[in-house]
Image (cartoon, rainbow, N blue to C red):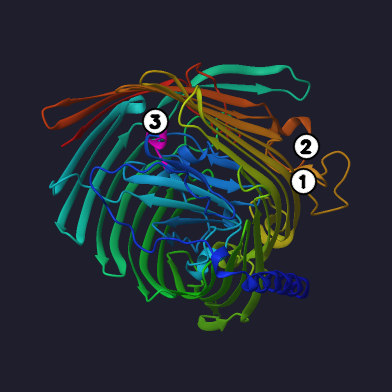
Amino acid sequence: MLKRFSITLLAIVACCLGSLAQDADDVPLGLDTVQYLENVVVYGRKPYAEVIPAQTLAGKKLEGLNSHSIADAIRYFSGVQVKDYGGVGGIKTIDIRSMGTNHLGVFYDGIQLGNAQNGQIDLGKFSLDNVEEISLYNGQKSEIFQPARDFGAAGSVYIKTRRPKFSGEKNDNFNITMRTGSFGLANPSVRWEHRISRTLIMSLSAEYTYATGQYHFRYRKKFSDGTIAWDTTAVRKNGDVQAFRAEGAIFGTLDEGKWNAKFYYYDSERGIPGAIVNNVWMNSQRQWDRNFFTQGGWQRRFGDNFETMVNAKYARDFMHYNNPDTTLMLVDNKFRQDEIYVSSANKYTIIPDWDVNLSVDYKWNYLNSTLTNFSYPQRHTTLAAFATARTWHRFKCQASLLYTMINDRYKTIYQGETLAHHSKWIHKFTPAVFMNYQPVQRYDFYLRAFYKRIFRMPTFNDLFYTDMGNANLRPEYANQFDLGFWYQRLREEGFFTGLKFTADAYYNTITDKIIAVPSGRGQYRWTMMNIGKVKIIGVDVTARATMHLARDFNVDVNLSYTYQKARDYSDPESTGYGGTYKGQIAYIPWHSGSVVGRATWRDLDVNYSFIYVGERYSTSCNERAYHQQPWYTHDLSASYTFSIGSTKLKVAAEVNNLFNQYYDVIINYPMPGRNYKLILKFDF
């Protein structure tokens, strides 16, 4: 595979070198700096910069969605499945194109959020209150000037927090927001932005969330012949949450660069409502989380050809899980993770429109726990990425080669003696190629394609969890192939002021997939093994239309659709009744989609959203007993903004699950029915 990639890469580079013979007049000109002029308005079409564009939610569009957390907002992207365990404080993880949660990288202001313990980021813990933009990339971000870690995931979510903006001579911005509504929700937040000097600004924000988490749900059970065993309504309990978030950042500008530093703190206690099984309606598990990280970045240009960037981060995560139910298993475990991360990226421009980049990262992870006979693992990871990007007339290409070196260290206790161990050094090369072509210059129509091979290491839980881990696990590999197109048409006047359409067909494979299998005679003992294999064929389609209906009356409609056939090829002998071979993998629907509409008239803003998830199965055994019905929700919100003196006031109301549909995203974890929210925002 590496040999084939090397030949392909050499062919692309040869094509790029051939373009050096073009005349100087053919080289497009650009601006190295931006000048701000008063009383000048410039109209023009935004240049198409990315080889593989991202799906993006930002600004008013993001604010108008009926979403409390980042995970709620990401549901509207195509190709994404969200696992939601219910309630305001319920755990929420996301999966892109059926490759698994662990293959998705989540980046917060350009630096990845880590979880070496289980590899999953609970996006339900991240509020939208201080978020400016969310972007989803398949493959990787279409930018070679980035840390090496950014090349190391099958897909990426980039979360960009608010950067302060000031009008005129104003040096301070204040925002106070209060949200209340169903489930006993009380969610106040405050944000202060201050301009210290012409080159230095800062922001501080804090938020508190309280909710009882109680809501009614419908519980139905059918026998195998389809007859109803029972059908009742109950109250979901032990879904309460108390959470506090504090965040601060400082931004500086240099003559030829910029820098930033920030801290983040999150502290929560929440109940885990658990699954509704065996006629048990309430669970007593509790979880406490304390997450802290501080990070910073520095970026500077030297001359016209060289630019460098340095990032660093320290994170500490604490989690306490308690299950006092002795009928199951008494559990009272505490975990503490530490992470240190440093990165250097260096970009050099060979000629205009041909860049190369070399990035080197180092990351250290450590996990401590109160578990008996725990291994206290630590992981050393070094990454180096070489990437090149070339634009030749209407053709753009990017290619990268990522080198990863990993070593794990852990301890075992044998006959009362503690023994230290080193795993084998892992050395892997993983390539990626991205291409984009504009057939006709006068039209915003682009063809695009990419190939990427990547892997993910087993997590600490996979390797070392007591009585379950397997220290001999191999990495899990993913291959991605994508072919699609992008079209856009913009007009200054007329009924339709903008149309955008994208479509992508893709084929992904997962090999050496890490799964849990029963060990021994009892179902209470499991072990982790590399026996999984998955093949995914899919299509993602998005469309957007902006319309000007009358004076001050505008409408924006966005649609997304995903088709996926994600089948389990792990065991060819697992066929017939109860078999899983070639079965659609768990919780992946064949069809899913969303519609988001926004209408504005002066200071009135109305938003409507619809999400549909088709039929699916709760396991790879696609038998009737595991079949899950489709579900869909309608959400509606309206807001009005007005001023009282120098204070801007916004009043908003939301209705979620408008038609009160009862549904489960994960089987036996019922979701809320119709619920409401009232929001007041003060800006001064």
Q: Residues within 10 Å of mark 3 (few under 14, many from 20)?
A: many
Secondary structure at numbered mark 2:
loop
The kind of residue on which mark 1 rests is: Arg
Q: Position of residue 659 (x, y in %)?
A: 51, 16
Query: Considering the image in quadrants, where does the N terminus appear?
Result: bottom right
Answer left or right for 604 relative to 524.
left
The answer to whether 642 appears left or right of 162 in the picture is left
Residue at x 44%, y 43% (from the top left corner): 44
Q: Which residue type carries mark 2? A: Asn
Residue 62 magenta: yes
Task: Depth check: give the residue in front, 426 or 183.
Answer: 426
**Marker disc for residue 567:** 1
Residues in magenta, as a range: 61-69
Q: Residue at x 83, y 43 (%)?
A: 579
Residue 493 position in % (x across, y down): 46, 27
According to the image, label 3 marks what residue? 64
The mark that comes first in sequence, 2 or 1, is 1
- Mark nearest the camera among 2 and 3 is 3
Which one is in front, 340 or 368?
Answer: 340
Please state which of residues 331 and 514 is positioned toward the viewer in this rendering.
Answer: 514
